Image (cartoon, rainbow, N blue to C red):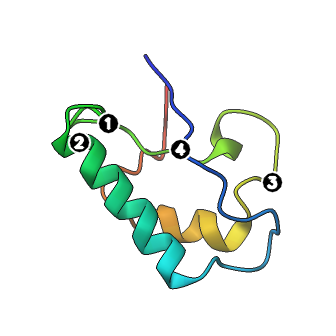
Amino acid sequence: MRLATLLKLSKTVRVLPHQAALTAVRKLIESGVSLGKIQPNYSLVGHRQLRDTECPGDRLYETITTWDHYDPHPT
């Protein structure tokens, strides 16, 4: 399994990043898939799923759980 960190949108647990930032991340992922830099069957996970941390923040984590390719049980 290869892992990539795209970016960190928010360092606060309670505040959701601006919609423009969320849209930009989704478009970045789409572009990565289109350019062959990200596998079409990629898994999207939050940092907290892989180690003991509050990252990426509760509001952002709740949001990414609704995105395509979110993996609730990464291996």
Label 4 crowd (10 A; few <14 / some 14-19 / many >=20): few
Which label's residue is closer to the chain start, 4 or 2?
4
Disc 4 marks a residue whose amino acid type is Leu
Q: Which residue is mark 2?
A: 33
Which label's residue is closer to the chain start, 4 or 3?
4
Residue at the image position 82 percent from the left and 45 percent from the top = 53
To which quarter of the image does residue 40 belong? Answer: top left
Q: Which residue is mark 1?
A: 42
Which label's residue is closer to the chain start, 2 or 3?
2
Q: Which residue is mark 4?
A: 6
Q: Is residue 40 above or below residue 27?
A: above
Q: Is residue 64 above or below residue 31?
A: below
Disc 3 marks a residue whose amino acid type is Glu
Element at label 3: loop
Label 1 crowd (10 A; few <14 / some 14-19 / many >=20): some
On residue 54, which mark appears? 3
